[in-house]
Amino acid sequence: MRILRSILGWFIFIVLVIAVVTFVILNYSWVFAKRVHGEIINVERVTNPTAILGKATDQQIHSYAVLIQNDQDGLLYTASSDDRQWQVAEKGYCVDATLYVYPPWNLEKSGTYFNARINQIMRCPGKSAPPANSAPNNVSPSNVAPPLNGAPPVNEAPRAQ
């Protein structure tokens, strides 16, 4: 009876170890994701939608390259993303983002980040005004409302009538 209990205990232990290892391998990017809180240094579209000929996918249209300076250690983190929330993110805003890391067995991209997700976007502490920018990513300078009585221009897209 003792031998049977010992064998059963080892069997359960081995099954649990295999299950944990399988979970980590299949969800490597999620398990080792990095949470970054800091200022957006740069965010750019990878491909301009007007440059895509033929049938474009959402992933091609909403593909961004992101550069964030972490508040804690001052390191710069770069990632790619197809998250539409980056459309409104601009240089100078602070962001709390999750960066997913490529697994080490993907040798070409190992150690780099992808699928950057915005958890929260806000004005940086100590800055009362939004970042000075000519226009948001989705508004061309010709669509910016003219200044009223010497006030700074309002960055709004034209409304449909």
Image (cartoon, rainbow, N blue to C red):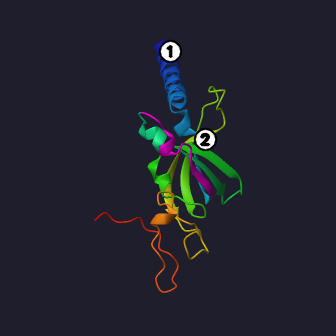
Q: Where's the C terminus, which quadrant?
A: bottom left
Question: What residue lies at 52% left-to-right and 85% top-to-bottom?
Answer: 150
| Marker count (numbered) | 2
* Dot 2: element: strand
Residue on which disc 2 sits? 113
Residue on which disc 1 sits? 7
Find the magenta span and give its range: 41-54
Please identify the residue farthest to the bottom as the structure is shown.
149
Residue 139 - label: none
* Dot 1: element: helix
Name which quarter of the figure residue 102 lies in: top right
Name which quarter of the figure residue 80 lies in: top right
Question: What residue lies at 50% left-to-right and 15% top-to-bottom?
Answer: 7
Q: Amino acid at mark 2?
A: Tyr
Mark 2 and mark 1 lie on one chain; the one further toward the N terminus is 1
- 42 within the magenta span: yes
Residue 148 at x, y = what percent?
46, 82
